[in-house]
Image (cartoon, grey):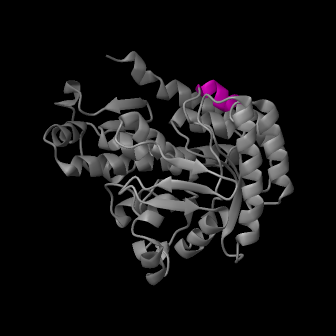
């Protein structure tokens, strides 16, 4: 899912985004609640209408942002990290103006019903890494209690509500969280609390613990992931859905994902390169422009460079998922995975 945190995928228009062939995009409850605000979204009839978007939208609950943005503020010394976690919900200061707000599981569902997203996430407690077993258990228990309240608060059947499995990097907590979440018979299941700084191998191990416990006939969503390698490895472990800012954020910094690995388009070696970013890619950027031209745009500080790079990276991720689906459908995923790594690692061996 391309990440459209504030009702837009950064650096691209709707038509440019559609050209990359996404199936669904992601918005964020925390950011949309603060700006433009639920009154504006209600006036416009929800996010689909507001941003003129016909395809599905998934909204994160905003819980992760409440904690992560407070942590960033504290680290940067701009504001005191002020988040107050209670049984009722979480009180927090806006990262925009310092005003106080209070999220409860019920309010978060209500906000997402106004947003009109097709898939809603419940308010959860996402502990940082590393974290103690005791703190991780408390997060699991509170997340489960909040999920019960979220399910009761949901008012319509048109919007799906997923459950979120927590437990940090503790297998016993992950198993308990998964089994108790499945007991609630949710529309889909998310694996949260990973890709928060732990080694990739630990993420894979926790995914291996959780996925076999989740129903095969419902979506399994690994939140906040990740690199192309993360995606291939996680699909191999049974995951269906992903989101991450990596393709768009990297594009704006001049890092492009290709069939043969990551490419720093600003590097001097591309100055006279007349080939596309990825000769196997069918995106607008690769069909029309050379590496040399993109390098020039970035080094000249032209905004168009960010747009063209974003189009390419989004299409790369969409193509990766398309290729994975085809390989699974044809019963050759293991062969696909081997070929993926053989190609993707080849740039590492080039000067």
Give the left or right position of residue 193, taking residue 76 as reference. right
Which residue is at a point 34% across and 35% down the rendered structure image? 255
Which residue is at a point 55% across and 55% down the rendered structure image? 91
Q: Quadrant of residue 117?
A: bottom right
Of residue 100 and residue 301, the one placed in the foreground of this image is 100
Expressed as whole percent of the image width and height from the top left, the position of residue 212 reads 81, 41
Expressed as whole percent of the image width and height from the top left, the position of residue 111 reads 56, 70
Q: Quadrant of residue 257?
A: top left
Q: Can I make out residue 324 in this image? A: yes
User: In the rendered structure, which segment of residues is drawn in magenta?
Assistant: 199-205
Does the magenta run of residues contain 202? yes
Q: Can I make out residue 281 in this image? A: no
Of residue 151 and residue 288, the one placed in the foreground of this image is 151
Expressed as whole percent of the image width and height from the top left, the position of residue 123 reads 64, 57
Quarter occupied by the C terminus: top left
Placement of 183 over or under 81, stated as above or below: below
Placement of 159 over or under 329, stated as above or below: below
- For the stretch drawn in magenta, what is the main secondary structure? helix
Placement of 249 over or under 52, stated as above or below: above
Does the magenta run of residues contain 111? no
């Amino acid at each position: 899912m391309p990440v459209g945190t504030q009702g837009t995928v950064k650096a691209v228009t709707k038509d440019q985004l559609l050209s990359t062939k996404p199936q669904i995009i992601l918005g964020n409850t925390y950011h949309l609640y603060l700006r433009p605000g639920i009154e504006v979204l209600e006036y416009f009839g929800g996010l689909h209408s507001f941003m003129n978007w016909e395809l599905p939208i998934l909204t994160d609950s905003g819980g992760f942002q409440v904690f992560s943005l407070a942590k960033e503020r504290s680290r940067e010394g701009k504001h005191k990290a002020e988040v107050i976690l209670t049984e009722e919900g979480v009180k927090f200061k806006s990262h925009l103006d310092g005003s106080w707000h209070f999220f409860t599981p019920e309010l978060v569902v209500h906000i997402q019903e106004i947003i009109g997203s097709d898939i809603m996430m419940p308010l959860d407690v996402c502990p940082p890494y590393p974290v103690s077993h005791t703190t991780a258990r408390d997060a699991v228990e509170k997340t489960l209690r909040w999920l019960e309240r979220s399910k009761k608060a949901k008012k319509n059947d048109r919007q799906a509500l997923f459950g979120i499995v927590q437990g940090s990097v503790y297998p016993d907590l992950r198993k308990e969280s998964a089994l108790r979440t499945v007991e609630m018979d949710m529309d889909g299941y998310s694996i949260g609390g990973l890709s928060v700084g732990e080694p990739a191998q630990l993420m894979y191990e926790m995914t291996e613990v959780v996925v076999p416990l989740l129903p095969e006939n419902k979506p399994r969503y690994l939140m906040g992931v990740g690199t192309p390698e993360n995606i291939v490895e996680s699909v191999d472990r049974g995951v269906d859905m992903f989101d991450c800012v990596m393709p768009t954020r990297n594009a704006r910094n001049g890092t492009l994902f290709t069939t043969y690995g990551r490419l720093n388009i600003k590097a001097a070696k591309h100055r006279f390169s007349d080939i596309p970013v990825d000769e196997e890619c069918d995106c607008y950027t690769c069909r029309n422009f050379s590496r040399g031209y993109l390098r020039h745009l970035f080094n000249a500080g032209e905004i168009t460079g960010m747009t063209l790079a974003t189009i390419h990276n989004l299409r790369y991720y969409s193509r990766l998922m398309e290729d994975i689906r085809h390989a699974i459908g044809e019963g050759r995923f293991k062969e696909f995975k081997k070929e993926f790594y053989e190609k993707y690692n080849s740039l590492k061996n080039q000067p």
